Image (tube, grey):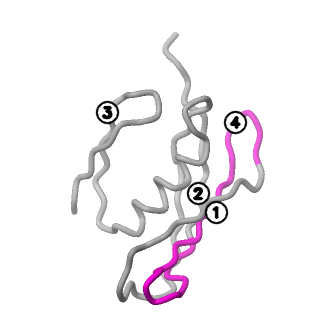
């Protein structure tokens, strides 16, 4: 496993242990869709690996599908740009980050 660190949109330090760079790309794409004004975290993730990454780089495209105040379903397609093919499909459930208090 690899540990990756980054800063959330609200400036908090985040850390995640992952065994798959493709998983991390999918998770970050889904969470970043909401921006700084409405930060969300990925609460659930299901990934379907379709092809191997041959050349890279990877491009992730996230879009909102359904949701409400309790969260959003966000699918992510991950493409190997160099090979021109879809390598993974990620389905995520994103929930809003609640402030303290």
Q: Are marks 1 and 4 in contact (CB under 8 Å)?
A: no
Q: Quadrant of the N terminus?
A: bottom left
- Distance between mark 4 and mark 2 Cα atoms: 14 Å
Q: Are marks 2 and 1 in contact (CB under 8 Å)?
A: yes
Q: Which residues are magenta?
A: 67-89
Q: Residue at x 68, y 53 (%)?
A: 73
Residue 92's disc number: 2
Tell me the residue that label 3 is attached to: 13
Tell me the residue that label 4 is attached to: 70
Is residue 31 found left or right of 56 in the rendered image?
right
Q: Is residue 69 above or below residue 32?
A: above
Q: Position of residue 82 (x, y in %)?
A: 43, 85
Q: Are marks 1 and 3 in contact (CB under 8 Å)?
A: no
- Distance between mark 1 and mark 4 Cα atoms: 17 Å
Q: Residue at x 76, y 45 (%)?
A: 67
- Distance between mark 3 and mark 4 Cα atoms: 24 Å
Q: Is residue 80 magenta?
A: yes
**Mark 4 nearby-residue class (10 Å; few <14, some 14–19, many ≥20):** few
Mark 2 or mark 1, which has the lower sequence index?
A: 1
Mark 3 or mark 4, which has the lower sequence index?
A: 3
Is residue 68 found left or right of 24 in the rendered image?
right
């Amino acid at each position: 496993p690899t540990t990756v660190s980054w800063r959330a949109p609200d400036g908090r330090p985040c850390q995640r242990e992952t065994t798959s760079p493709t998983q991390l790309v999918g998770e970050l794409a889904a969470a970043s869709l909401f921006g700084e004004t409405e930060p969300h975290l990925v609460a659930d993730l299901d990934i379907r690996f379709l092809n191997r990454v041959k050349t890279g780089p990877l491009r992730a495209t996230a879009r909102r599908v359904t949701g409400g105040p309790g969260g959003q379903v966000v699918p992510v397609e991950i493409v190997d740009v160099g090979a021109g093919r879809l390598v993974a499909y990620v389905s995520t459930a994103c929930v809003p980050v609640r402030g303290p208090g």
